[in-house]
Image (spheres, rainbow, N blue to C red):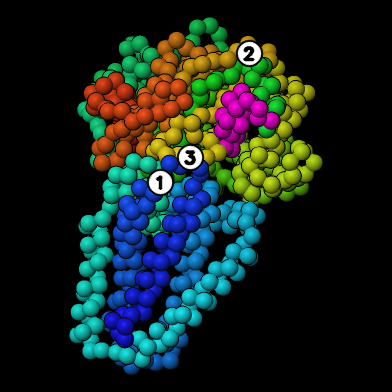
Amino acid sequence: MRRSRFAIVAWMAAVYLLVAQVTRCVLAASLPADAGVGLHDVVPIAALGLLYDLCFVAYASIVPVLFVAACPTVVWRSPITRAAIHVLCFATIYGFGFIVAAEYLFWREFSARFNFISVDYLVYRREVTNNIAESYPVVAIFSGIAVVTIVLYALLARRFDVALRNDGPARSRWRVAALWLALPVAAYFGVGQELRDRIGDNYARELASDGPYQFVAAFRNNELDYVQFYQSVDSDHAVAVLKEDLGAAPDDYVEPHSRSILRRVHAAGAEHRYNVILVMVESLSAEYLARFTPGSTLTPNLDALIGESLFFNRMYATGTRTVRGLEAVTLSIPPTPGYSIVKRIGRESGLWSFGNVLRARGYDTQFIYGGRGYFDNMAAFFSGNGYGVIDQSSVPDADIGFSNAWGMADEDLYKQTLAAADRANSAGKPFFFHLMTTSNHRPYTYPDGRIDIPSGSGRDGAVKYTDYAIAAFLRDARSHAWFDDTLFVIVADHCAGSAGKEDLPLDKYHIPLWIYGPKLVAPREVDTLMSQIDIAPTILALLNVDYRSMAFGVDALSPQHPNRALIGNYQYLGYYDGRDLTILQPRHRIERYRYDDANSRKVPVDANDVGAEKARAYYQVAAETFKDGLNEWSRTGGGTP
């Protein structure tokens, strides 16, 4: 093989395998102190990691092997071919270095190998490229990769020349190619995600993975069929179990003998035509508040607001991405496996939504976003579900005082909100505005002179600026005619981090929720265990609205609320009842963690117990409802009972 044409492919494969193992070591060295990955994990991580690395090499070498086998001798030995192969080899080694850098930066942000998020980042290159340029020393990184590439290439160049000068008969080349190409076939049929999923510790599982292999797997599996991959039961039984949690009387269901959860919600007394401004704050974990982390000084204004609001102590995000939060609050639906509904292009519109309910009642409904609405398909999702859209692209540059890779600063977003509220109020219309902020996001830059932490210095500064901007917004809003008739709802889209030893670390989903209206709601703290899917029903109850609901959530202030939280990521779906977290996993598996005080331990699961029944009911019905079009807005007949 040393003098064979295929030596070039073999040497490049060896370089990748070396790079992949070095990457694994670097990522392991940067694990948090409480990761729990010990010396006993080294061998299984390295062995399984090498297997996935070999699988990626097998797939990536298909085209080069076919070219080497098929290339005629006269072409193979030509100066043009030699030059082209040297250039391609150099570029490939540089590409390996780029992957290492990208994986390291991605790991620092998410404590995971490439996944669905990295696929999103490839699609939305403008925001991501600008974010990287503003957050990291890009020139130094690229220069360092170039230096390492030159060194490795210098060590291999002579070996490439030897292979380029030697040749063999075509028949012999094709025999070698046939043997080589058997590797990707074996990898396709013999190696899958189930091998890594057998590792119980999440950090160890990620280390045993191969970044590019996981990237391709995420790209292929952006939507999972629930029944095919998860534990399921008879659909009618799942709906019956879910209806027990929804708290509606049997006579309230519009189609009682179908699998639809469409039901009438009746309010006692007159409707309140309050305005609603719902502020969804980027990455505002509960841990930033002194209420949950004594001694924290990052959110003095939001901590003070607790005593002036309805404040919900046990609120949990449904996911780890902005689109999951938007989906849950807007559609009141649990996360379905794969991509969020927000990103199901072609199927993201015409659904029952918070906005459609209020628009049908004469509200001016707007989605107001600090960035550009095309990102994550937000504009299409909201405009297709009862909202107008105001975003960075619709705001004149002169009206934006500060912006970064992700959009305009929160202060500018709130100025646009005040102006839109004044317009609606002047037109005599109540309004419902759903805001999405961007400032609490890398590169963590914001206007100078606002807080005592320099812009761009890290997450703490962005959190404190977020707190400052919300306080300034509420202060400015008090001078407007509509203030006394407005409910301000402040909630996070998700937590700042999602990594942990468990598949769904519960503390990485805990977020705060305020409902503030000095003339409208009496301040108190609420200990109901709740989810983002409960926000729309809770606010609609405060508005005393009669409507037709397809919500999976329940009014959190009602005694009928089931006291549960739904959390998930792209593949793992969790149901938390205050003690046990039941997790549905692909390949029809189910796990449970029991929380005793602040600790958790894995416990056996009976597939027929209440936790498993509830988990299957919520997620199976949500998936089938969306798949079968049972949550389409048109089915409500306009939304009123």
Residue visible at 48% across and 17% down in the picture: 528
Which residue range is magenta in the image?
A: 275-297
Which label lies toward us, 3 or 1?
1
| Labels 2 & 1 near each other (Cβ < 8 A) | no
Q: Amino acid at mark 3?
A: Asp
Which label lies toward us, 2 or 1?
1
* Count of residue discs: 3
- Secondary structure beneath label 2: loop
In the picture, measured across the screen, residue 223 lies left or right of residue 321, that is left
**10 Å crowding of disc 2: few (<14), some (14-19), many (20+):** some
The residue carrying mark 2 is: 523
Residue visible at 23% across and 89% down in the picture: 169
Which label lies toward us, 3 or 2?
3
Q: Amino acid at mark 2?
A: Pro
Most foreground residue, 144 or 399: 144
Q: Amino acid at mark 1?
A: Gly
Most foreground residue, 167 or 489: 167
The residue carrying mark 3 is: 34
Residue visible at 36% across and 91% down in the picture: 165
Q: Is residue 85 visible?
A: yes
Q: Earlier in the sequence, mark 2 or mark 1?
A: 1
